[in-house]
Image (spheres, rainbow, N blue to C red):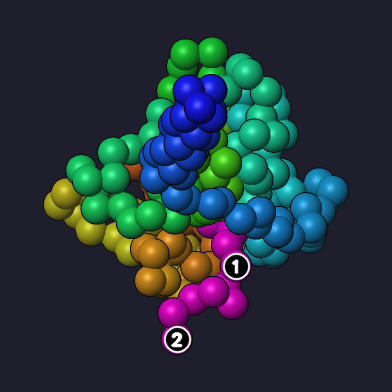
């Protein structure tokens, strides 16, 4: 009789433990399909092609795909995720600073990003400001405005303000944010300093069919 009672108690404890584990983490992160990544290629000078651009992302001598699961990168890379509350980020949406061997290289925007499962996120946007990074041959702190135009042509839109100084070229399609706050578009943005030298380049490549109608 005592043995039966002990077995019953053990079973109950196992059930409570399992239930506790389920309550601790109810999020099930589904696998996100990544569109085919083209082999690196170029197009005629002065032409913008977002797939050509995204096929030529180099950071610290390493090729980056976009979009890309964070788990595809080796251990040299580290992501420090932004706090959701501080930045008003909804579940599914995230941002992180990108580090290589402890050195900050840029900022990435993430989808499929959930609390406790950040490492399973998909990177869909990269912004870089360092001279050891380049996107389609455009290198921060090195490339000049004239060189950008020679590579990918005149921008589709341009913003220039004197105070505080901002000068930005935009190429491609940007539909805006979806319900989770994720940017939907295929675009790049290049900003320049007062000497017309690139100070930042950002590329976004996300599923435009998911944009809020």
Residue 59, given in percent of the width and then of the height, sits at: 61, 30
- Residue at image position (67%, 23%) is 74
**Which quadrant of the rendered structure holds the C terminus?**
bottom left
- Residue at image position (61%, 55%) is 30
- Residue at image position (45%, 63%) is 183
Q: Nearer the viewer, residue 81 or 204?
A: 81
Residue at the limit of the structure toward the left, as seen here: 163
Whether 210 is among the magenta residues is yes
- Residue at image position (54%, 13%) is 101
Q: Taking 67 as reference, is 48 above or below it?
A: below
User: Can you identify the residue that label 1 sits on?
Assistant: 207
The 10 Å Cα crowd at callout 1, few under 14, some 14 to 19, many 20 or more, is: some
Q: Quadrant of residue 57?
A: top right
Q: Quadrant of residue 162?
A: bottom left
Q: Nearer the viewer, residue 130 or 46?
A: 130
Residue 111, given in percent of the width and then of the height, sits at: 50, 53
Give the SS element for disc 2.
loop
Q: Taking 121 as reference, is 51 above or below it?
A: below
Q: Which residues are magenta?
A: 202-213
Q: Taking 102 as reference, is 91 above or below it?
A: below
Give the SS element for disc 1.
loop
Q: Nearer the viewer, residue 50 or 113?
A: 113
Whether 107 is among the magenta residues is no
Which numbered circle lies on residue 92? Answer: none
User: Can you identify the residue that label 2 sits on?
Assistant: 213
Among the two numbered marks 2 and 1 on one chain, the one whose residue lies closer to the N terminus: 1
Q: CA distance from mark 2 to mark 1?
A: 13 Å
Examine the rendering and report whether any part of residue 167 can be seen: yes
Residue at the limit of the structure toward the front, as seen here: 1
């Amino acid at each position: 009789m005592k043995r039966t009672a002990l077995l019953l108690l053990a079973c109950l404890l196992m059930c409570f433990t399992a239930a506790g584990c389920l309550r601790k983490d109810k999020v099930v992160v589904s696998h996100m399909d990544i569109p085919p990544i083209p082999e690196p290629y170029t197009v005629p000078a002065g032409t913008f092609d977002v797939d050509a651009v995204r096929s030529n992302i180099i950071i610290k001598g390493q090729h980056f795909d976009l979009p890309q699961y964070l788990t595809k990168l080796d251990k040299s890379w580290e992501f420090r995720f932004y706090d959701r509350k501080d930045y008003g980020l909804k579940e599914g949406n995230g941002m992180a600073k990108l580090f290589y061997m402890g050195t900050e290289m840029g900022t990435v925007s993430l989808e499929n990003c959930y609390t406790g499962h950040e490492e399973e996120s998909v990177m869909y946007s990269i912004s870089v400001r360092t001279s050891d990074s380049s996107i389609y041959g455009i290198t921060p702190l090195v490339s000049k405005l004239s060189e950008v135009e020679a590579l990918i042509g005149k921008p589709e839109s341009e913003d220039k303000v004197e105070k505080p100084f901002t000068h930005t070229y935009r190429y491609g399609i940007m539909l805006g944010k979806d319900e989770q706050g994720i940017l939907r578009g295929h675009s790049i943005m290049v900003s320049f300093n007062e000497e017309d030298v690139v100070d930042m380049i950002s590329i976004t490549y996300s599923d435009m069919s998911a944009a809020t109608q």
